[in-house]
Amino acid sequence: MDVTLMSAPPESTPLHTVSILGATGYTGREVLRLLIDHPHLEVIHVTSRRQAGTPVADVHPELFGRTDLVLSAKEPEAAAEADLLVSCLPHGVSGAAVASALAASPELRAVDLSGDFRIPPNEYEQAYGRAHPAPDVASEAIYGLPELFRERIAGARLVANPGCYPTAALLALAPLAKSRLLTGATVDAKSGLSGAGANPGPATHFANANENVTAYAPFAHRHAPEMQTHLAAAGADVPVLFVPHLVPMDRGILASAYAELAATTDADALQKIYRDAYAHEPFLRLVGPDRLPATKAVTGTNFADLAVVPAPGGARALVLCAIDNLVKGAAGQAVQNLNLLAGRPETEGLVHRRVAVEVSP
Ligand SMILES: NC(=O)c1ccc[n+]([C@@H]2O[C@H](COP(=O)([O-])OP(=O)(O)OC[C@H]3O[C@@H](n4cnc5c(N)ncnc54)[C@H](OP(=O)(O)O)[C@@H]3O)[C@@H](O)[C@H]2O)c1
């Protein structure tokens, strides 16, 4: 193996150690890929139920020569030895694993990528159709959208990393919510297939997904209450309708948010609202009117590209937001949150980094 590719920080650098639960999946792979190059966070454990004992670079060949880590099934031990935990497990499984890790290691701080801690347990049971896996710790969770809640994230023990669709929808609508202009919204969003994880189902089977675009779970997707809850926290407790679509691409989300406004607002006023809200955000780029957000422009990056366009003839506006679901919608945002928990600059290991874009483990 060519060890010269492996990154080694200077010996004097204080490191925070990290465990990744569920490192064989799409988001686990992305977190590992980003952290391999991080100057102050060092991954010491990667776990898998099914592939324990296998070098993680055998599962993710693009990491060959970049890490010697071997997958382990020992989740509690992994958590106990690390400073920080990132869980990339499915919902239900993840909440239980994170709760037991936090119980076993009082100093541990965790970022959970699943939906288990993003909404209160009573809403969770309705949206996810199952009992909450860890209601006792749920009240501790801070919603990890740094651009809206970074002060609260920095002091948290448990961070609920946002869902990919809610990341795009909330970034699109939050400035209007904060400015008290938003009275309601309809979010129409298109996602690449990696949003469904590494195990294909009938809807993501190549023969069904290729050359095909479909809506699914209209007005009933489990990300809708997450959008509603955190838009209210951002300043607008208003109805949000959400319709997701699958499109035949590997990765990326384009959210088209149709916002209803309290008053007719022109293009200059809308631009000012977004500039005031996001001008200093390192990962948010206001584009348009000449170039509108597009998934390819953000692929493999932690950027969210946004544009706001007033609708003719009334108090409505279209806000577009493009993200990479696996980076700003998952792993990159998790690294932002890890940086905040570790007291590191939020952009460390992320700025202008464009990661390779393969999706297959
Ligand atoms: N994909 C996205 O765009 C995205 C975006 C935001 C958030 N998320 C959330 O992030 C989490 C991970 O998503 P993902 O797309 O990375 O999923 P994935 O590709 O299916 O990976 C799931 C990981 O969990 C492990 N695992 C452990 N116990 C499991 C169980 N009982 N059933 C299934 N897998 C189990 C799997 O590894 P072994 O089988 O080797 O144990 C695998 O490493 C999910 O909660 C998802 O909702 C995903």
Image (cartoon, rainbow, N blue to C red):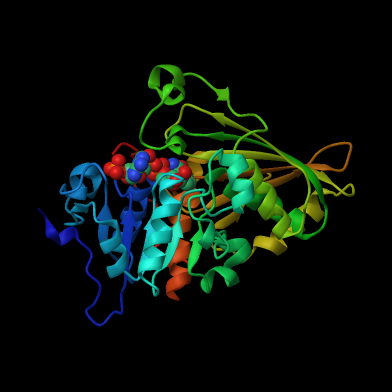
Q: Residue at x 46, y 45 (%)?
A: 91
Say whether residue 20 is left or right of residue 311: left
Q: Quadrant of residue 206?
A: top left
Q: Residue at coordinates 13% horizontally, 59% vertically from top-left?
A: 3
Measured as percent of width and height from the top left, residue 13 is found at: 29, 79
Give residue 86's quadrant in the image. Answer: bottom left
Q: What percent of the width, then of the height, locates residue 252?
A: 49, 39
Q: Residue 119: x, y in percent?
A: 60, 52
Q: Judge from the rendering whether residue 199 lies leftward or rightward of residue 63; answer left or right.
A: right
Residue found 55% across the figure and 51% down from its top:
304
Residue visible at 15% across and 49% down in the picture: 53
Which residue occupies the foreground of this view, 294 or 206?
206
Q: Residue furthest left?
A: 1
Count of numbered badges drawn on the protein: 0
User: Would residue 199 be found to the left or right of residue 115 on screen?
Assistant: left
Is residue 243 in view? yes
Residue 357 in view (yes/no): no
Q: Nearer the viewer, residue 222 or 23?
A: 222
Residue 295 coordinates in the image, percent (x, y): 52, 40
Q: Ligand 1 is located in which of the four quadrants? A: top left
Quadrant of image for the C terminus: top left
